[in-house]
Amino acid sequence: MAATVERPKPVLVPDSCKGCGRCIDACEHHCIEPGSDIDPVTGLVPVRIHLEHCTACGLCFDACPEPYALRPEFADAARASRPAPRATAIPAAEPIPDAIVELPPAEPLVIKGMYASAIGAILAGCRHFFGYPITPSTEGAELMARLLPRLDGQFVQAVSEVAAINMLYGAGSAGVRATTFTSSPGFSLMLEGLSYMMGARVPGVVVNVMRGGPGLGNIAPSQSDIKLACRGLGHGDSHAIVLAPATPQEMLELTMLAFDLAFKYRNPVIVLADAYLAQMTGRVTLPRTMVQPGVPSWAVAGDEAHRRNLITSIYLSETELEGENLRLLAKYARMVDEEPRADLFECGDAEILIVACNTPSRMAKGAVRTLRARGVKAGLFRPLTLWPFPIRALAPVLGRAREVVVVEASAAQLEDEMRLAISHANLATPPITRVNRLGGILPSHDEIVSCVVSGARAPALEATA
Amino acid sequence: MSVFYERFDRHDAGEGVKGRSTHYCPGCGHGLVHKYLADAVEDLGIQNRTVAISPVGCAVFLYYYVDAGNVQAAHGRAPAVALGEKLAHPSSIVISYQGDGDLASIGLAEILQAAQLGIPITVIFVNNAIYGMTGGQMAPTTLMGQRTTTSPEGRGRTMGAPLRMAELIAQLEGPVYVERVALYDNKQRVKAQRAIKKAIGLQVENRGFAMVEVLSECPLHLGLTPAEAERWVKERMLPVFPLGVKKDATATREIWPAWKTPIVDPAVVHAVIGGAAERVQRFCTRFPRELWGRDIALKLAGAGGDGAQTAAMIIARAAINEGFDATHIPSYGPESRGGTSYADVRVAEEEVLSPAAPRPHVLLAFNAPSLAKFGPLVADNGIAIYDSTVAPDPPRLAANVIGVPVPATAIATGLGRVTVKNIVALGALAGATRLFPTDTFLTAIRQALRDKPALLELNEQAFALGAKAVAATH
């Protein structure tokens, strides 16, 4: 005997019915009519159903916009029982931890800074790259386009930086290690996506190669996105760790570190480079280990274990959003506590403390050597994290310094970060001198030395002082 | 049953009636589309694999209802987010759900790229001809003459005509299936259900990108009852947005290539990133401090194609092979596409500190303009080597700068391949400066030609002739 599929008849659930009446026209047997009684729970007027003529055709179910306003009623009692609730029945996913595995030994590579970043990303377990070509970062994307297919990874040239950062958001939401490389104008376009990433706690790594601005500016080296990365990373109260490499070697190392920090904090991490650093070829020693990434418990990974997960940054209730803001602030506070990093050179007895990062810190290091040779007690303080600024490392050397000389290729953006950190730490601000160049010019060794020795000022300084 | 949550815990904590009803206004089409989506996921048996991307717009809270993986995207960016999700876990079934402002206005670039890429994702596009969430403003799909809060006199000519997204997407190569459906009567609703299930099913088959545009009702902002809104869609929207299948390449479209799991085997990674274990032989006994101290600046300059960058890279690699530090900065701007090519190289005993070379100790100029431009900048006691074939006139150099002419182009031409003139010039540089032993340079040249062993002999000859030419002129 052929089995017949029994179709259910509708039973109205009045407090789920909004009385829209779309079911009324759908019913060809006129079983449903507009209601007249206000439902005390919803304040709406649900429809009325008479089942005398109902043929269980089911059309009313398909016409009702509400999931639960019409309850199916089966004559067969066995089918009438509701299925067990599903969403809450799934236990939280267990995280699959990353594995650190040994790499075969290798001779140093001689590669561009952007290549070093790309290789660092690969060694950190990144197999997904989303990017848009922009000078002077493009070579990194080009290398990823060559290498990732050989590792069965994914390279996508996005339609814009806006799309690229949102692909990063998607891949990060899925819990995989993904990255994008860009340069200043492209970084501006990514700020919306970065704000969403911070709001929704999505990890990802953005390498921004700073070039001259504002506007189209030029493609020469600059440091004028420090403010953007440290203070203006999209709308809302947001922060991300900002790493500042100074050599191709550090492009690799800090890009690798960026992935660990991004997943440690579920937050994007910015690697701020400059155009010289991106384009410069140098010696890069490979690490002894690489990362085989796991799957975090919160990932929306498209399987049963992670089905209950949600990635979002919307909190309509002000108190809920304030609560989330406070949780994010607590996370940022943890970054401030645990992640500041700095490199100190000849700072032990320094009376002249030079502060610099990225490529200018190399010139500054040379200047320190020259000054030391001339008997000037100079030292270099180089922040590796621009946010959080390594104030605890700076404080003791600041106390000994007679003068601080900030060397940078921006209009005092690094200096401002330092001043804010000094102010928040309630430290006395020492006399600060600037050696800064703009327009895509880096301060030179000679400019730094002559500034310290004779107080000579670089041309850009007068305009910005 | 479908894959809705049993109780909508995310809707105001699921308390009271909100736990069992949507946030939509009475008669809104979104609820229907949600149901068809949820039914399709259930029917296809893919609930655990499903990832729903919520847009910005009234459907921002799709994740209140659909019991699947949920990601909420920025306005218009859902297709980009969907691609990121899909490529991260290709076995997942990713559904991008968008309204007309989201997809057809602010997210035009994202939807066009996703559609043209053709990667299997499913887009459900709800077109109700108005901005609902922000309160009834003009949408890209608002009809001509339709009054909205931002077209108070009716949409006029200066506001452009409504965008027909289904037709626009269907004419791209990428999508496998595009259909426009409606919700205004039983027949249309059945078609809508089928289309949504088909579009998701095509992703399950790994067939490709599919989009269903759903003409939907927004009774609130149309100022109509739900029944009137259904009629409005039928009578007003249909003439502008004709229903039907706009593209269906299901029968001919090949299945998308099988997705592979990314490789994380360290041996493979090591090989792919170019790791080499064999130690490079060293020939220097010490850094050539006697030349210009512990930090030497070189500039190589010429026209694009002269090979200045390759020669610069070989010098840097040679120095690093010897355990010294070196950097090379190429010119990378528009000027390098426009014919000139400069390279700054620094070679330091311990650490390069200033990677640029504004006052080089060594200039290698491949043409007369480069010699004229950089010759005067050569540092005291420096050397300016130049291709005398193309720059025959003696350069004006400072008294304590040595000019070294090398007929690099002529020598390279004599070897039958003018492109090796950079290696001829490099040989001359080696000969004139004694920066490193010949074997140091030859080792770096061999590394540079690792993938072109057939050219090795020619390049070694070129290097030797360059060195010899300098010896002859001295």
Image: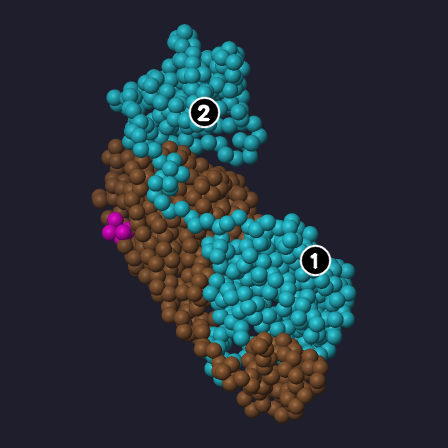
Q: Secondary structure at mark 2?
A: loop
Question: A348 left or right of A455?
Answer: left
Q: Principal SS element in the magenta part? A: helix
Q: Which chain is cyan?
A: B
Q: Residue furthest front?
A: A1
Q: Residue at x 32, y 61 (%)?
A: A334
Expressed as whole percent of the image width and height from the top left, the position of residue A104 reads 30, 39
Q: Residue furthest left?
A: A349
Res A294 quadrant in image: bottom left
For badge 2, the amino acid type reads Lys
Which is nearer the eye, B12 or B332? Answer: B12
Q: Chain of mark 2?
A: B
Q: Which residue is mark 2?
A: B452
For badge 1, the amino acid type reads Lys
Label 2 environment density (alpha carbons within 10 Å; few <14, some 14–19, many ≥20): few
As drawn, A326 above or below B444: below
Q: Which residue is mark 1?
A: B246
Q: Is residue B121 highlighted in magenta?
A: no
Across the whole image, how many numbered discs are drawn on residues? Answer: 2
